[in-house]
């Protein structure tokens, strides 16, 4: 009497292994998600292994800052990152030109004696410029305010004059080495970076983190490529990170 054997072929085995890995991954992700929610609810600091990709990015940036460092936050907005910098650095210079946002920035960072806030816009020259926003965005009408006249998500019927500060001159006048600059200035980033390069002020800066706005500003891609080429020519790639979320 013969007995039939149930043989698992290599193909079936591979499929089962894939299913097992997917099941384990979903199970692990479910546990991680549940644990994250509990920690957040209890206001407990999330450990590195539970951080998402963006959180890990910021964690690596903050880890570079020490208590004797000088930080410049351009486009400080409500002060989320200004506050994080202030917890770690000696001094944080924060720039936010919109008066309504600036009031919130001051309120959110008033507990930090090492924050120096300016209601001014950063540019490649001192003077005045028109700041544009889109009040039709009722939930966040000041989000994405810009000096650029080519940004697609603002109304150019609504603008007002603001004071501008030339970043390179500001840095040179500090007479200090700047550890880190965060640049989130809605389409004016490459004007400011080029000024840093051409003025030589970049020598007084260790790291520059940039949020790129090419997807929102007409013509910015060409300016970006020209700026990146200039950075490569000067062999300064190690100073710049264009991946700020």
Image: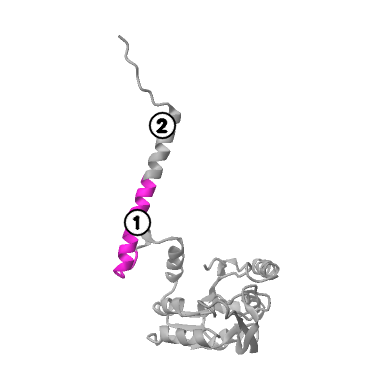
Dominant secondary structure of the residues highlighted in magenta in the image = helix
- Residue positioned most to the top: 1
- Report the residue at 41% width, 44% height from top: 22
To which quarter of the image does residue 121 belong? Answer: bottom right
Q: Position of residue 173 (x, y in %)?
A: 56, 88
Q: In this view, does 111 lie to the left or right of 192?
A: left
Coloration mode: one colour
Residue 150 position within the rendered picture, expressed as x and y whole percent measured from the top left: 68, 75
- Disc 2/disc 1 C-alpha distance (Å): 28 Å
List x then y, in percent, for residue 5: 35, 19
Residue bearing the label numbered 1 = 32
For the point 62% across and 73% down, which residue is it?
A: 153
* Residue on which disc 2 sits: 13
- Please state the extent of the stretch shown in magenta in the rendering: 24-46
Look at the picture and state if 179 lies above or below 18: below
Label 1 element class: helix
Tag 1: Cα neighbours inside 10 Å, few (<14), some, or many (≥20)?
some
- Locate the N terminus and report the quarter of the image it occupies: top left
Label 2 crowd bin: few (<14), some (14–19), many (20+), radius 10 Å: few
Q: Quadrant of residue 114?
A: bottom left
44 vs 224, nearest the viewer = 44
Name the residue: 63% across, 70% down: 216
Q: Taking 16 as reference, is 185 above or below it? A: below
Q: Tell me the quarter of the picture where residue 47 sits.
A: bottom left
| Residue 203 coordinates in the image, percent (x, y) | 58, 77
Q: Is residue 223 part of the magenta span, yes or no?
A: no
């Amino acid at each position: 009497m013969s007995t039939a054997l149930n043989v698992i072929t290599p193909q079936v085995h591979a499929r089962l292994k894939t299913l097992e890995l997917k099941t384990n991954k979903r199970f692990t992700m479910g546990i991680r998600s549940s644990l994250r929610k509990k920690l957040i609810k209890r206001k407990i600091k999330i450990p590195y292994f539970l951080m998402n990709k963006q959180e890990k990015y910021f964690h690596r940036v903050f880890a570079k800052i020490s208590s004797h460092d000088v930080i410049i936050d351009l486009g400080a907005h409500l002060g989320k990152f200004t506050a994080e910098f202030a917890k770690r650095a000696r001094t944080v210079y924060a720039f936010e030109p919109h008066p309504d946002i600036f009031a919130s920035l001051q309120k959110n960072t008033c507990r930090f004696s090492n924050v120096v806030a300016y209601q001014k816009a950063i540019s490649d020259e001192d003077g005045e410029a028109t700041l544009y926003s889109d009040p039709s965005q009722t939930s966040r009408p000041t989000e994405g305010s810009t000096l650029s006249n080519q940004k697609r998500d603002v109304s150019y019927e609504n603008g007002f004059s603001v004071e501008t500060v030339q970043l390179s001159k500001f840095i040179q006048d500090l007479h200090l080495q700047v550890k880190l600059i965060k640049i989130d200035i809605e389409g004016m980033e490459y004007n400011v970076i080029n000024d840093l390069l051409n003025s030589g002020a970049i020598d007084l800066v260790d790291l520059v983190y940039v949020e790129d706005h090419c997807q929102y500003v007409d013509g910015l891609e060409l300016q970006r490529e020209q700026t990146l080429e200039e950075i490569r020519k000067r062999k300064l790639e190690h100073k710049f990170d264009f991946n700020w979320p």
